[in-house]
Amino acid sequence: MSRALPAATGPVLIALILAGAPLTGLDEYSLTLLLAYGLLGLSLALVWGLGGILCFGQAAFFGLGAYSYAVAAMNLGESTVPMLLSVVVPGLLAAAVGALMFYGRVGDVYLGVITLVVTLILFKFVNSTAGEAYVIGHARLGGFNGIPSFPPLNVPGRPDWPIVGMALYYVAAAVLWLAWVGCRWLGRSPYGRVVAGLRENELRMQLLGYDVQLAKTVLFTVGGALAGLAGALYACWAEIVTPGLFSLGQSAEIIVWVLVGGVGTLLGPIFGAMGLGALKMALGGQQLIDNSLVMGVILVVFVLLLPRGVAPLAQRAWVRLWVLRGDATLDAQHPHHTRPGSRPEGGE
Amino acid sequence: MDQTLVILIDVAYAISSLLLVASGLALIFGLMRVINLAHGEFIVLGGYTTIVATKAGVSIWLAMFVLAPLVVGLFGVLVERVLIRWLYGRMVDTMLATWGLSLLISGGISTLFGATTTGVSNPLPGVSIGEYQTGGYGLFVIGVAVALMVSMFVLLRYTRAGLIARAAMQSADVVAALGYNPSRIYMATFAIGAALSGLAGGVLAPLTGLTPTSGGQFIAKAFITVIGGGASVVTGSIAASILFATVAKVVEALSTPVVGEIALLLTALILLRVLPRGITGRWFKGAV
């Protein structure tokens, strides 16, 4: 898409947008939350958009990341190791669940059921952990009430230098930017090509000799780890973690973000998450219409009318405006892109 | 002896409520291969219909057995015409659209009724078994589940309508060539599945208080029962319900209800891993 522009334009532009956002008068507190949502959207964009694996339980990894951070931070009183754990623990769970599913060769629908069930198990378990029996070190899991008042993010090695407010925003922005650049690189690497290939036709990739199960498991693990990191950012922002993070509603929201942003792109879901997150905040201020009603309408409308999301429209507009100057159509150059999960029209 | 009987009734009740909750989804998924993630909200709609009608002075039995299935069945027709029929054959898109629908319904209910728990009182007295007491309504639920399964089996296996419905799912073209309209058959099947969900909601409403978000607890159980059961609508649901409910009850007796539920979900995970086509993909093949 950036034929006429240098390859680094995109990353630089996004970095400038992220750096400049607080200067527009939006408060950094809300913006930080949107960054965590953006990272969460990116994690599913990777798994679903790149790999075609529709995970109904991305919230499980998000919640687990947040809880790992909270529990570890309470025990250690410092945030560096907890940050690492918030990536490693959900990553391990994702690797285990992924291996279970992909080596078991379960189909699309069953994959949805399994990820949904894993989320429910975690939700029910964490919800029931009230009381003295459920303590990890110094941290009481607290059941329905969650874990409040754990140490915030701090400068590595210096627990007395907390990172809050505007500093937290910039850390989150840097994390999101790095994660996005990393995912972009991953998508363009040889491994990313294999993953994209098996999204389009798994059998063909298998016959060509690629280890499909391994490639999918690795992708699912990376997605889970990223969602966990988003959870840790959320925990640092909210300063409390509750079982609601594991809920099906949360999982649904992530899917809506990605679908609205555009399945198959990386930036689309990030901005989809941020835009819809901002919409949710705006809706939270009024009592007239329930938030999930709005999310439901958006999801239905997009599945029926705009199944490829907003990103392809934006991309087309961008190409028309800047690259082609309106003299050719994009469709001629990108002949046929099958949306992951749907049947290719006309068959193989 | 009396105690054994009470425990058996308890397990039978657990199996029955699982069957009730799953029946509508089993019909829709088993015959149409459509995963309706708004199924839990269909049940909640049936429950709310019953509660609202009862509070308006309608007899609870009339509300439960006539109004709830009727209202949700008609709603099912609407959903099928507006939403589902554009998505046949696109399983994942159907799942997404119906999930959106489920959010829409639960949001709509909480906008209309507020996010509070509502319910109706249990119309049946308890029953004494020796020194023990058990809920009369539990026995009623068991009866309803048995009657429902028998009538579904008879309908699908022995009537012309059941034959046409099953044929339409196997080969829509052949059915169309024989003079039946597949689009109508799909619509009717979906409506009947929705009506069954409404019935389940109505029957279970006096036992469980309902909130706008109650759908979530039904959908997961219904989902794993249907998927765990496999392709056969009636046989699969019964087999999976017996397995899951028994596991949940046994574990619950040994620990707490929450651990029982978690054991149920874990059993479902293991079952799907070992038998990816469900129980009837391995045994009772070809049964209805």
Image (cartoon, rainbow, N blue to C red):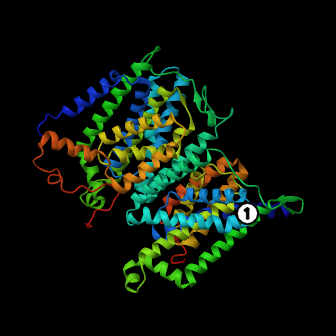
Task: Mark yes or no: residue B258 visible.
Answer: yes
Residue under the image location 48 percent in, 66 percent down: B277
Of residues B140 and B118, the one drawn nearer to the viewer in this rendering: B118
Rendered view: A305 above or below A60 = below
Q: Position of residue B196 (x, y in %)?
A: 59, 67
The chain containing the residue under callout 1 comes to B
Of residues B151 and B177, the one drawn nearer to the viewer in this rendering: B177
Callout 1 environment at 10 Å: few (<14), some (14 to 19), or many (20+)? Answer: many
Task: Mark yes or no: residue B18 visible.
Answer: no
Residue under the image location 44 percent in, 36 percent down: A228
Q: Residue furthest front?
A: B56
Residue under the image location 21 percent in, 43 percent down: A317
Q: Quadrant of residue A188?
A: top left
Residue under the image location 38 percent in, 66 percent down: B89
Counting the numbered discs, the total is 1
Q: Residue furthest bottom?
A: B178
Q: Is residue B162 left or right of residue A28?
A: right
Rendered view: A320 above or below B36 = above
Q: Amino acid at mark 1?
A: Ile
Q: Quadrant of the C terminus of chain A?
A: bottom left
Residue annotated with mark 1: B60
Q: Quadrant of residue B7?
A: bottom right
Q: Is residue B229 left or right of residue A342?
A: right
Rendered view: A152 above or below A269 = above
Q: Position of residue A137 (x, y in %)?
A: 60, 27
Q: Position of residue A207 (x, y in %)?
A: 26, 61
Of residues B82 and B16, the one drawn nearer to the viewer in this rendering: B82
Rendered view: B174 above or below A225 = below
SS of the residue at dot 1?
A: helix
Q: Is residue A160 left or right of residue B132?
A: left
